Image (tube, rainbow, N blue to C red):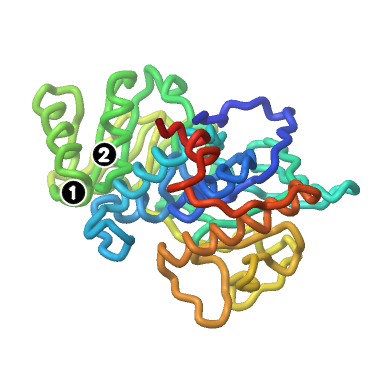
């Protein structure tokens, strides 16, 4: 599998299917589409696969996934990623699809906020409750520095080499980036309002070891103000129990959680019902032929917002998508347990 985040902005990518959302339903959709020889590109605004399961509760146990009495959000995402490896999907992380239009040949033209352009016959919306938007800290003037000194995700670790980095937060994202960026940082400070963390215990232990070695500073307190030279962030005001100080900072990564918004999807001309996308239950197609919606973002009578329901929806969607991509080809239903051709695709010996 490939992370194609660095694709040239001017490149037009032609593919069979674009899946919007790399949560469990989006990842399983890649599997079902792959069984039918459909090439997929997957776009997600987050910087990793797994969607809400990984971003909001990676360690939270899930008990209702068939055949898995207990699985965490991270484990489920990892297993799904392993399952789709044979199909080599291309991933575009930290990107959001902003524009969607239909071309004269019937294909869809999608444009991301990073300038990536896709031409595809099928679009699968698997965006959960919508796109995740990072919560902005209540710091005056922070918008001025977003994208240059303030980052809500990191595309290239090397872009932050040699900088005074301040990470704010106490969850997995904050701890993961503290550990990942420390080797390239000039200085690294982790700021959290209390000396307790919601992150994986192993990550917390690693962070505390770096603090003990003097490689990371752990500050219990809050960032209350930003100081800049023009558009360039220079330092932040750090308030702790001992008072205030100016902390050198020319790269700040705040992780205050995420909000879910329907976002640009609301402007694509689809029928909507209370910020959900109505679909039929035969194909899980929207009001626009060739655009499907699966998982928590769709709506139909009897809908249950369960991961297993999304898996079912992905399977039926894939059958209908195949007929659109290859209209003259008969879709032959096969079982992976008995089909030698499917087993060959999966690399089963």
Along the line of sight, the residue nearer the viewer: 53 or 335: 335
Quadrant location of the C terminus? Answer: top left
Residue shown at the point (49%, 60%) measured from the top left? 128
Callout 2–callout 1 Cβ contact below 8 Å = yes
Decide: is 163 above or below 282.
above
**Secondary structure of residue under mark 1:** loop
Along the line of sight, the residue nearer the viewer: 190 or 53: 53
Along the line of sight, the residue nearer the viewer: 321 or 61: 321
Decide: is 305 above or below 82.
below
Q: Position of residue 87 (x, y in %)?
A: 53, 35
Are there few (<14), some (14-19), or many (20+) residues within 10 Å of tag 2? many
Q: Which residue is mark 1?
A: 197
Tell me where residue 62 sits by quadrant: bottom left
Left-right relation of 70 to 293: left
Whether residue 154 appears in this view of the structure is yes
Q: Position of residue 200 (x, y in %)?
A: 20, 44
Q: Position of residue 190 (x, y in %)?
A: 25, 37
Residue shown at the point (33%, 61%) measured from the top left? 66
Are there few (<14), some (14-19), or many (20+) residues within 10 Å of tag 1? some
Label 2 and label 1: CA atoms lie apart by 9 Å
Left-right relation of 348 to 240: right
Q: Which residue is mark 2?
A: 175
Left-right relation of 248 to 115: left
Residue shown at the point (55%, 51%) measured from the top left? 334
**Secondary structure of residue under mark 2:** helix
Lower position in the chain sequence, tag 2 or tag 1: 2
Q: Position of residue 40 (x, y in %)?
A: 61, 41
């Amino acid at each position: 599998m490939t992370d194609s985040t660095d694709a040239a902005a001017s490149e037009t990518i032609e593919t069979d299917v674009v899946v919007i959302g790399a949560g469990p339903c989006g990842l399983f959709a890649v599997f079902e589409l792959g069984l039918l020889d459909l090439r997929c590109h997957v776009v997600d605004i987050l910087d990793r696969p797994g969607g809400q399961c990984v971003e909001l509760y990676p360690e939270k146990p899930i008990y209702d996934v068939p055949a898995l009495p207990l699985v965490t959000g991270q484990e489920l995402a990892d297993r799904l990623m392993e399952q789709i490896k044979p199909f080599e999907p291309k991933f575009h992380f930290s990107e959001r699809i902003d524009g969607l239009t239909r071309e004269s040949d019937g294909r869809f033209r999608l444009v991301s906020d990073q300038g990536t352009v896709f031409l595809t016959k099928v679009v699968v919306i698997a965006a959960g409750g919508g796109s995740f938007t990072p919560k902005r800290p209540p710091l005056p003037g922070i918008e001025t520095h977003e994208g240059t000194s303030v980052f809500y995700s990191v595309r290239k670790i090397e872009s932050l080499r040699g900088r005074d980095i301040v990470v704010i937060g106490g969850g997995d994202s904050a701890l993961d980036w503290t550990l990942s960026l420390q080797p390239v940082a000039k200085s690294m400070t982790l700021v959290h309002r209390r000396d307790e963390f919601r992150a994986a215990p192993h990550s917390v232990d690693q962070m505390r070891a770096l603090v003990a070695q003097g490689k990371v500073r752990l500050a219990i307190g809050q960032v209350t103000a930003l100081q800049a030279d023009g558009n360039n962030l220079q330092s932040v005001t750090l308030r702790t129990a001992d008072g205030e100080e100016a902390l050198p900072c020319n790269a700040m990564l705040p992780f205050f959680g995420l909000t879910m918004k329907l976002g640009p999807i609301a402007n694509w001309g689809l029928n909507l019902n209370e910020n959900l996308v109505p679909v039929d239950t035969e194909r899980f197609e929207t009001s626009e032929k060739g655009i499907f919606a699966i998982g928590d973002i769709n709506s139909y009578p009897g809908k249950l917002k369960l991961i297993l329901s999304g898996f079912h929806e992905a399977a039926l969607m894939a059958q209908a998508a195949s007929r659109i991509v290859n209209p003259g080809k008969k879709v032959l239903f096969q079982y992976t347990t008995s089909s030698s051709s499917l087993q060959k695709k999966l690399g089963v010996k």
